[in-house]
Image: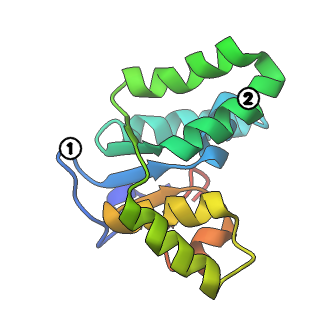
Amino acid sequence: MGSLRGALEGAGEGARGLALILDTRFLVAHAFPPSREDRERLLEFQRKLVRETLLIPSIVVAEFIKVAGLRVGLAAARALVGGWVRAGAQVSEVTWEDADRAGEYLLRVPEVPVADALIAAQAVRFSAAVVSDDHHFRALGVRVVWYKH
């Protein structure tokens, strides 16, 4: 796997490096790797993330707790996402500008879920790439990176 910097050439720089937004799909894959091979790739990818500025949109926290909570319960789901925050990820709140930009995206591409539009808007605000394999982000012109690439 190539470096994140190479994969994200031109993405915005944060205080610690590249700004990356962790999407729900990544957090779920990280918490519940689908295979042993995926677990190994995720661990390698996670080591690279240490150098980056990590953001978790508040809506991703809610989505993750819903998805993970169904599998492991509310307390464990909170602990899993809280681990990222304790490790240095910042939770980013939705602003008026994010909501406005997301609404514009939804008018232009109505099949995109509201949560994805809000996450994409934050990616623009922070000049960040989104760690996800969700095709909706590419449809909105947002840079993405995934642990399998």
Q: Position of residue 49 (x, y in %)?
A: 39, 41
Q: Which residue is mark 2?
A: 68
Q: Amino acid at mark 2?
A: Ala
Question: Which of 5/68 is in front?
Answer: 68
Mark 1 in CB contact with mark 2 (< 8 angstroms):
no
Where 83 falls versus 96 (above or below)? above
Residue 142 point in image, percent of width and height: 48, 72
Figure disc tally: 2
Depth check, front residue: 52 or 105: 105
* Mark 1 neighbour class, 10 Å CA radius: few under 14, some 14 to 19, many 20 or more: few
When asked about the image quadrant of residue 115, the answer is bottom right
Element class at badge 1: loop
> Would you say 104 lies left or right of 53 here?
right
Q: Three-letter amino acid code at disc 1?
A: Arg
> Mark 1 and mark 2: span between their CA atoms?
29 Å
Q: Earlier in the sequence, mark 1 or mark 2?
A: 1
| Residue matched to label 1 | 16
Q: Residue at x 71, y 80 (%)?
A: 110
